[in-house]
Image (cartoon, rainbow, N blue to C red):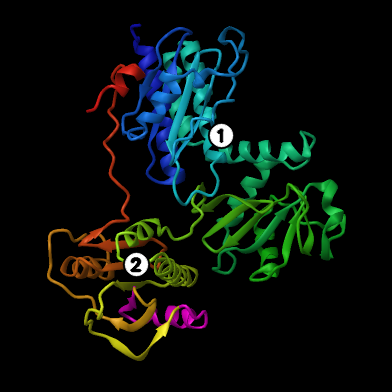
Amino acid sequence: MVLDRHHMLSLHNVLEGLRLGLCDYSGVTRVAVVYAQAPGEPLRIVDPQGLLRGHEPRLREYYLDTNEWCEGLPDPEHVSYFDQAKSKRIGLAGVISLGGRSPGVSYQMWFTDRHVDLCSPGPTRRWLELGLLQFSHNLAAKDLFSLDSAALMLQEMAPHAVHDYIVDERSKSTGPDTRLRVYNILGAIMQISKTPEEGAWARGHLAFVEPSRLARLHYLMRFPKAERPRLDNSKHVRKMLQSVERSKRQLVSDGEHIVGIATGELPPSSLCALFSGRHGLLFMDDRLVCSFSDGAFQSTNRKPNLVILEEALLEWPLDADQRDALFASVSRIVAFAGEQKYGCALIVDPYTPLLPVSGHTLETPLDLDNPEHLPLAAALAKVDGALHLSATNNQLCGFACLMDGPSFPGEDRSRGARYNSALRFTFSHPELIVVVVSSDRPVSVMQKGADISRPPVWPAVPSLLRPPPTLEHWLGDDS
């Protein structure tokens, strides 16, 4: 089959629209697709940044060695909308996928990165669903003038993806008959998050409850119906949030007005926005949906990402109990720093005896297995300099330690003194690991003079895609 210009532009614009939008939502993200436009055509693959490399055995089994990929899908000639029954069955680690049949494309399966700090894959799947529909529409419409606008539309779909996920999940328990208008709620959350009050940003819980279930709440106070503040008056709601700051109380809304202040559990299918200053988290029941910051929804759960540290510790001669105790201590100290928004550094030392480091030593090391010692260690991390931890004993042996070392080409001048001191120190002492926490939340893990937690740099997506190879040819290509 010869792929015409319209086909290639449709493919490129949908893929780029999805990729750029998901990069804003989740950080650096790749996108790939396996598809066949018409029944009987060979499956083709578009993977410009190597997202699916490493998954070749499963892809071959799923698509070529068996008919697993098309089992249960309806006949393409009788598809009126689309079917996504196969969206989860391929099972690639670290990848989110969604696909099925649609009127304009016989089969398509879209893939994207599953980030380790993801709140929920639901909104991302809804985003891929929008890409699936747009690709199908583009190929069926044959309208070159609409392709650029389709790409721009897909880049700005975060609120719509979050909305679609919430509506789908709530409809499973409440049905379609609901009076909560999710778009209005999401818009109100954004406005409140951007509205300071006397120089302070919003804090506290704002719950959204189905009107028919409001009577189930335990109210501390309620407003008369005629005097309830309107939800779209963000300035007024922001003032009201001051009454629930740093407490277990919740400001309660029916989606249009503020009803009152309550405590205790919310009824099923309720939404709750937790405002925490410049950022916040959105929950549905007890499930985290997404976060929000700087006027935008994001996929991150805002927890420190220490997966790379956990992997690095596997290389050290520690038994499982030592490794788990050490990782738990480091994670808790990093969490303290993130919660209180201060920068710090932790030297994790596997040596016996420990490497001599200039700083304050302790007459008796603090045993970090003792839960009373962890808050003290976290408080000592505020002092200029680094904490010095023994990896084998899970002890704090020093604080305010100086990390020095000669300059070397791997330094990053765009980062601060603590970051580059850690790079120099680990370059001079390659067996050590240093964890650096910045006051604005990023966590870096240094080893051998490199930031091993830095996201990889993927190849740039070409301005125009080449005609995609068949999946069979791609799987046989070792390059």
Number of the front mark, 1 or 2: 2
Q: Tell whether position 383 is magenta.
A: yes
Q: Quadrant of residue 125?
A: top right
- Residue 294 is left or right of residue 466, and the answer is right
User: Residue 453 is drawn in which quadrant?
Assistant: bottom left
Identify the amino acid type marked 2: Leu
Kindly identify which residue carries mark 1. Answer: 126
Looking at the image, can residue 74 be seen? yes
How far across and down, in percent of the image, does residue 334 sit? 43, 69
Q: Nearer the viewer, residue 320 or 444?
A: 320
Q: Secondary structure at mark 2?
A: loop
Q: Of helix, strand and loop, which one carries label 1?
A: helix
Q: Any mark on residue 318, and which?
A: 2
Give the quarter of the figure containing the C terminus: top left
Quadrant of the snapshot with the N terminus? top left
Q: Classify 10 Å Cα crowding around label 2: few (below 14), some (14-19), many (20 and above).
A: some
Mark number for residue 436?
A: none
Identify which residue is drawn at 50% across, 21% down. Answer: 69
- Is residue 114 found inside the magenta-colored segment of the image? no
Q: Which residues are magenta?
A: 369-391
Q: Which tag, 1 or 2, sits closer to the chain's start?
A: 1
Between marks 1 and 2, how big is the CA–CA gap? 43 Å
Above/below status of 203 relative to 294: below
Residue 282 at x, y = what percent?
61, 52
Q: Position of residue 5 (x, y in %)?
A: 34, 12
Viewer-side residue, 107 vs 63 = 63
Amino acid type at mark 1: Arg
Which quadrant holds residue 29?
A: top left
Q: Residues within 10 Å of mark 1 (few under 14, many from 20)?
A: many
